[in-house]
């Protein structure tokens, strides 16, 4: 179908060249027609020309090379005929990229086929690229290959938190967006590590479509705003990258609730106050710090430390006046939570009491002062020391007595005038006050006979034999004056004597006639009466020998020589002694032998022979006895 060619005949030959541009129609019928000349007529001849497909070469190159994941690379296949073939191949080239992705087919134009391809991974790099020319009617197929090196693509990581700001305990969601710097590249895979900037451990989570999210709760404001960092850890195709943000965290609001137990209570009872501090949504967590409790009764506030969100104190309301009391708990806040307060009411009633009364001494005696003591105590769970007054009833018909409590006790004194009615019922009635209820207690007071003591004395002491001694018994008691009689025993074997008490005193007199047995034991025995018990007292009485005087008389005096002389001695006790001395008297006259003469009735006499003329001394020596002391007397005898 190509244009005919005409050539000159030279030496019988005409030659032309022709390139078949296609195999379509092969074998081709070639016809040569000689056009003749002036001498030769025209003629024609024919032949056939078989034309086969021309061989080709295919060369492939990629650009740029190397690339990174997601970056487009242009792959160009150059298809050329191989001599002696000529011409421009047409048709298509099929590209294989070596990464498992689908092949691409491109038309050959001017010997070139061009496609673009983005590698989604470095796995398998360098990749073998194959371009296969598929041939056409005139050109046979061929293929060529190249390699494409693919590196990890750089990434960018952006992190944001929401909500921002938050409060302590409020969860915030941190979102990291990881993207390739190469536009159109696939989404990176792998993990992102989040650092929260508050000292807590970091958290790693997996990317999904280039997005990684994590929730985090900040438990404190210390350090706010917190630097938030999201670090993409890279994968086989993408390099790591990081991004940062700041999360502002404010203190969370709180609510404080306070309760008291037990409620109601009584005066003096310990009450436990518990404050519960909670975070108010969206805040969360457990507040720390201290709570200050105000009790509403005028006492000093108390402060306690929170533990697990609660703080407790104990407080004792000492009175019911002012009840119900307003109890307030003020949370003082901490680094993560704002302060708050709550209140409650505590009802305090009067505490029950018990009253005990005792008397001392018990038993007592009539006329003795008795002390009655009432002890008023709070009954558990009440506590404290009751105040006010106690009224005492003595049970003997006398008027009641009232005393003021001091330190929980009240005392009065009372004197029972008689035993009649004993034992007496004693009642102490506590009259109560604003904080403590009234109560009463009972006891009995027994009156017995009064104890007595008997004291005995004697005067004079010592005394002398024959002297009269006054013996005095004094009977006394702690209260009152005993009456009745006292019996005296003198210790000398004589009969007892009884005397009546007067003003508590009884007196007798007694003469001791001998010293034998001295000192004598004096005993005074009080026999008691209706109100007083008997008692006994003793003393000793010392009796010494009585002093004596002796009177000596000689008769006749004067005498004459030849007269017989009678000497008479009279011995008498010296007052206050009485009695008649016994024993002997030694009578003597100068120049004559002494004579011991017994006393008879206090007198002793002896006769002496006539004396010579002159003056003679007559001596009488009383030799004493058990009761009477010796004594001496003299006289002068004249003999004419």
Image (cartoon, helix red, strand yellow):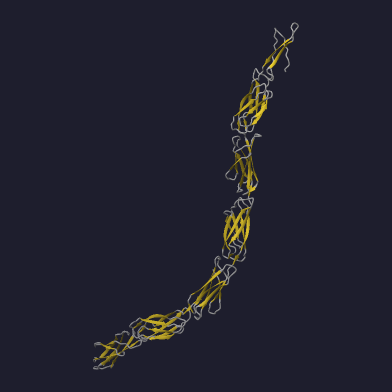
Q: What percent of the width, then of the height, locates residue 539?
A: 39, 80
Residue 541 vertical position relative to residue 22 in the rendered view, above or below:
below
Residue 620 vertical position relative to residue 184 in the rendered view, above or below:
below
Which residue reaches farthest right? 38
Q: What percent of the width, then of the height, locates residue 461?
A: 38, 82
Q: Nearer the viewer, residue 322 or 453?
A: 322
Q: Toward which corner of the image does residue 499 lie, by quadrant?
A: bottom left
Q: What percent of the width, then of the height, locates residue 369?
A: 50, 77
Split into 4 quadrants, where in the image is the C terminus? Answer: bottom left
Q: Toward which corner of the image does residue 270 lie, by quadrant?
A: bottom right
Q: Is residue 298 left or right of residue 548?
A: right
Q: What percent of the width, then of the height, locates residue 434?
A: 60, 68
Note whether residue 64 is visible: no
Q: Is residue 414 left or right of residue 253?
A: left
Q: Nearer the viewer, residue 123 or 64?
A: 123
Q: Is residue 23 left or right of residue 491?
A: right
Q: Toward which corner of the image does residue 129 lie, by quadrant?
A: top right
Residue 196 vertical position relative to residue 501 in the rendered view, above or below:
above
Split into 4 quadrants, where in the image is the N terminus? Answer: top right
């Amino acid at each position: 179908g190509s244009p005919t060619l005409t050539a000159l005949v030279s030496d019988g030959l005409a030659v032309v060249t022709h390139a078949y541009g296609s195999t379509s129609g092969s074998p081709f019928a070639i016809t040569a027609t000689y056009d003749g000349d002036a001498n030769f007529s025209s003629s024609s001849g024919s032949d056939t020309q078989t034309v086969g497909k021309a061989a080709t070469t295919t060369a492939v190159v990629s650009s740029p090379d190397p690339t990174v994941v997601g970056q487009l690379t242009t792959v160009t296949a150059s298809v050329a005929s191989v001599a002696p073939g000529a011409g421009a191949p047409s048709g298509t080239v099929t590209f294989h990229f070596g990464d498992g992705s689908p092949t691409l087919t491109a038309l050959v134009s001017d010997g070139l086929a061009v496609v673009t391809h983005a590698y989604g991974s470095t796995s398998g790099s360098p990749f073998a690229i194959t371009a296969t020319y598929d041939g056409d009617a005139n050109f046979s197929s061929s293929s060529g290959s190249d390699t494409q090196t693919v590196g990890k693509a750089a990434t960018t990581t952006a992190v944001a938190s929401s909500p921002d700001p938050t409060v302590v305990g409020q969860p915030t969601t941190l979102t990291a967006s990881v993207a390739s710097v190469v536009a159109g590249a696939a989404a990176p895979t792998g993990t992102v590590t989040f650092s929260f900037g508050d000292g807590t451990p970091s958290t790693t989570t997996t990317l999904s479509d280039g997005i990684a999210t994590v929730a985090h709760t900040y438990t404190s404001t210390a350090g706010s705003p917190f630097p938030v960092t999201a670090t993409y850890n890279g994968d086989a195709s993408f390099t790591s990258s990081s991004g940062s943000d700041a999360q502002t965290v404010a203190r969370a609001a709180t609510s404080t609730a306070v309760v008291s137990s037990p409620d109601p209570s009584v005066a003096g009872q310990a009450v436990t106050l518990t404050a519960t501090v909670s975070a108010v949504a969206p805040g969360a967590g457990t507040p720390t710090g201290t709570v200050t409790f105000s009790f509403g009764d005028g006492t000093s506030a108390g402060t306690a430390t929170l533990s697990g969100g609660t703080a407790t104190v104990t407080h004792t309301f000492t009175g019911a006046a002012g009840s119900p009391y307003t109890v307030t708990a003020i949370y003082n806040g901490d680094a993560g939570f704002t302060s708050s307060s709550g209140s409650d009411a505590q009802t305090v009633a009067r505490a029950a009491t018990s009253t005990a009364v005792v008397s001392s001494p018990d038993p007592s005696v009539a006329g003795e002062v008795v002390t009655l003591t009432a002890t008023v105590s709070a009954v558990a769970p009440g506590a404290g020391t009751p105040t006010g007054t106690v009224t005492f009833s003595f049970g003997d018909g006398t008027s009641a007595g009232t005393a003021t409590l001091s330190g929980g006790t009240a005392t009065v004194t009372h004197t029972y005038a008689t035993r009649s009615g004993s034992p007496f019922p004693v009642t102490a009635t506590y009259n109560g006050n604003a904080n403590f209820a009234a109560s009463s207690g009972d006891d009995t007071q027994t009156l017995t006979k009064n104890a007595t003591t008997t004291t005995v004395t004697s005067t004079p002491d010592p005394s002398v034999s024959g002297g009269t001694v006054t013996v005095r018994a004094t009977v006394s008691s702690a209260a009152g004056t005993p009456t009745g009689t006292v019996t005296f025993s003198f210790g000398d074997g004589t009969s007892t004597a009884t005397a009546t008490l007067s003003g508590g005193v009884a007196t007798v007199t007694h003469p001791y006639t001998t010293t034998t047995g001295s000192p004598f034991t004096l005993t005074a025995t009080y026999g008691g009466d209706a109100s007083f018990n008997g008692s006994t007292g003793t003393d000793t009485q010392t009796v010494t020998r009585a002093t004596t005087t002796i009177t000596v008389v000689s008769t006749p005096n004067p005498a004459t020589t030849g007269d017989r002389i009678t000497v008479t001695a009279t011995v008498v006790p010296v007052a206050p002694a009485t009695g008649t001395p016994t024993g002997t008297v030694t009578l003597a006259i100068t120049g004559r032998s002494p004579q011991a003469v017994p006393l008879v009735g206090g007198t002793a006499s002896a006769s002496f022979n006539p004396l010579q003329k002159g003056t003679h001394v007559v001596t009488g020596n009383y030799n004493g006895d058990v009761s009477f002391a010796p004594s001496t007397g003299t006289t002068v005898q004249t003999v004419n």
